[in-house]
Image: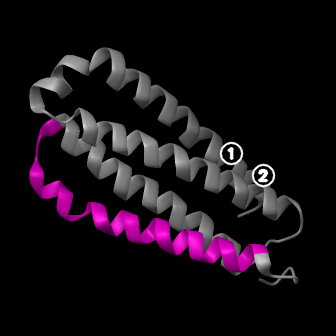
Amino acid sequence: MSGSAWMRVASVLGCFAVALGAFGAHVLKEKLEALHTTAIYHTAVQYHFYHVFALLAVGLLSLHGRSGATLSIAGWCFTVGILVFSGSLYTLAFTGMKWLGMITPLGGLAMIAGWIALAIAAGSRSSAG
């Protein structure tokens, strides 16, 4: 994907992070407290935001000539990581379905892979990186 496409993905996911954070703090507060899942929801929002910033870095690097397979892998890993890690925690917090915690680490692994790919891409001197 192009740098501007990654910037759009980051922007949309950032919008959702703000909306979900506000929704949890205001609309779901009592439900989350009743389920004792406030901390889980907070963790989902926190990691969601962190990786939106990582996606912005992917977009910026791509816009500045660092496009390539490794940078694209980083972007996809961050996107999948947000969807799986934060998504499973959001759903767990809403529903209390504990089995969702089993897939959360897969999202975390995607996020870790994204950071490794971003480091490789950022250090690459060529545009093939």
Dot 2 surroundings within 10 Å: few (below 14), some, or many (20 or more)? some
- For image coordinates 19% across by 57% down, the residue present is 101
Relative to 53, 123 lies left or right: right
Q: Name the amino acid type tagged 2.
A: Ser
- For image coordinates 28% across by 51% down, the residue present is 88
Q: Residue furthest front?
A: 39
Mark 2 vs 1: CB contact within 8 A: yes
Residue 110 shown in magenta:
yes
Dot 1 surroundings within 10 Å: few (below 14), some, or many (20 or more)? some
Where residue 20 appears, as percent x and y from the top left, is 41, 30
- For image coordinates 57% across by 38% down, the residue present is 14
User: Quarter-wise, where is residue 104 in the image?
Assistant: bottom left
**Secondary-structure class at tag 1:** helix
- For image coordinates 58% across by 48% down, the residue present is 52
State the extent of the magenta-drawn residues as a range: 95-122
Q: Is residue 54 above or below residue 126?
A: above
Residue 115 shown in magenta:
yes
**Secondary-structure class at tag 2:** helix
Where residue 67 appears, as percent x and y from the top left, is 80, 72
Q: Name the amino acid type tagged 1.
A: Arg
Residue highlighted by disc 1: 8
Relative to 119, 113 lies left or right: left
- Name the mark on residue 4: 2
Q: Is residue 18 above or below residue 129?
A: above
Measure the C-alpha gap from mark 2 to mark 1. 6 Å
